[in-house]
Image (cartoon, helix red, strand yellow):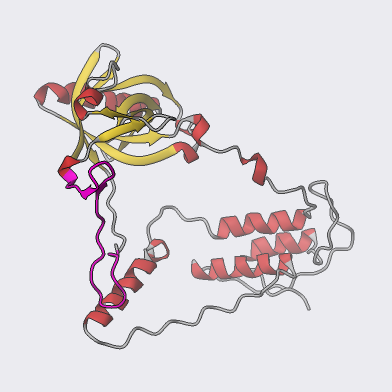
């Protein structure tokens, strides 16, 4: 695997020579830009505005543009010589519980590979400490012209590094929080039943495969061989508007359980004899008839819910 960074992992007074390699691979189909008239490739050209001519990639460097338009050249050597302790090292600054990290802040993953016999013992020591303490490590490092924070965790006997966004890089969700609504207890129970029916132990299985890329490869191969394009399967009919939330939830539970191979006696849901307790305050809305508590319990004990009562 190609290296993206070579330096040291520093924790306390211990320095571990490491190489950072990519932990993920990109398998998506990449398209080239073409001239649609004749199929010719369309390429980028690098143009110098001062000399008014095309330049090669090797002639291109970095520069910072000031508000007035003046550009300050910055060389790679100057970036490597920045007065930062993290310029050539990944500095460990804290240990925290894994749930304390907001998943929205977690970025691309890398593997840390120890370099040389001298690095093996402290590398394995840190790995075992992370495992036994059930913690992740917060680190600071400088890549690609900026200082960043990241976290270290153990995966498959290797220390993995994930870049983290800074707190101000994650937008405040307040602007998109939905307004309060009224929910029936039965609707919440049915949603929890759907969560249970759709729960899996891992991300393994055909439902987690990249069907889009597979289908795209089929189309490309058919065009390459001058064959007829694969037929598109008709999508399952979906209602255009949600009319009965409870019925939709119950049918979803049935389908999820059937997908897991679970079976049970069908049972019709009955309307309640008394109004259900409101779960939250808000604008009142008309809800579908909910099932009784005895019907809910019987449905759970019976295994599979039946169709809603007509």
Quadrant in the picture for the N terminus:
top left
Place of residue 285 in the rendered image (x, y in percent of width and height, measured from the top left): 83, 59
155 or 307, nearer to the observer: 155
Q: Quadrant of residue 130?
A: top left
Q: Quadrant of the C terminus?
A: bottom right
**Residue 73 position (above or below residue 246):** above
Q: Position of residue 296 (x, y in %)?
A: 73, 61
Where 21 falls versus 124 (above or below)? Answer: below
* Secondary structure that dominates the magenta span: loop
Residue with the most extreme left position: 117
In front here: 227 or 98?
A: 227
Residue plotted at (35% across, 24% down): 140
Q: Is residue 208 above or below residue 74?
A: below
Q: Is residue 192 magenta?
A: no
Q: Residue at x 39, y 85 (%)?
A: 231
User: Magenta region: which residues?
Assistant: 31-57
In depth, the one of 31 and 10 nearer the eye is 31
Residue at 75% over, 48% down: 179
Q: Is residue 181 left or right of residue 230?
A: right
Q: Position of residue 142 (x, y in %)?
A: 31, 27
Looking at the rendering, which quadrant does residue 301 occupy? bottom right
The x and y percentages for residue 10 are 26, 19
Residue 284 seen in the current view:
yes
Q: Is residue 69 left or right of residue 8?
A: right
93 on left or right of 310: left
Residue 1 visible at all:
no
Asked if residue 48 lies in the magenta stretch, the reply is: yes
Q: Which of the 4 image quarters holds residue 8?
A: top left
């Amino acid at each position: 695997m190609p290296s993206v960074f070579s330096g040291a992992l520093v924790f306390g007074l211990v320095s571990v020579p490491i190489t950072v390699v990519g932990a993920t691979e990109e398998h998506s189909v990449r398209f080239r830009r073409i001239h649609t008239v004749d199929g010719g490739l369309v390429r980028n050209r690098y143009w110098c505005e001062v000399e008014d001519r095309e330049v090669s990639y090797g002639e291109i460097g970095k520069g910072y543009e000031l508000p007035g338009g003046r550009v300050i050249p910055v060389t790679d050597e100057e970036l490597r010589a920045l007065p930062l302790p993290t310029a050539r090292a990944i500095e460990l600054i804290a240990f925290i519980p894994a749930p304390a990290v907001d998943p929205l802040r977690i970025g691309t993953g890398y593997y840390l590979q120890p370099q040389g016999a001298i690095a093996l013992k402290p590398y394995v020591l840190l790995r075992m400490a992370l495992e036994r303490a059930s913690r992740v490590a917060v680190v600071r490092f400088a890549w690609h012209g900026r200082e960043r924070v990241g976290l270290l965790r153990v995966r498959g006997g290797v220390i993995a590094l994930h870049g983290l966004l800074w707190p101000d890089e994650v937008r405040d969700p307040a602007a998109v929080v939905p307004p309060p609504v009224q929910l029936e207890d039965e609707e919440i129970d049915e949603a929890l039943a759907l969560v249970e029916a759709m729960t899996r132990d891992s991300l393994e299985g055909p439902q987690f495969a990249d069907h889009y890329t597979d289908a795209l490869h089929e189309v490309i191969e058919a065009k390459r061989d001058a064959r007829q394009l694969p037929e598109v399967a008709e999508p399952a009919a979906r209602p255009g508007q949600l009319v009965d939330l409870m019925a939709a939830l119950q049918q979803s539970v049935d389908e999820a359980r059937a997908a897991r191979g679970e079976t049970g006696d069908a049972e019709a849901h009955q309307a309640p004899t008394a109004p259900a307790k409101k779960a939250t305050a808000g604008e009142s809305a008309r809800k579908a008839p909910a099932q009784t508590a005895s019907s809910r319990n019987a449905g759970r004990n019976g295994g599979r819910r039946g169709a809603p009562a007509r």
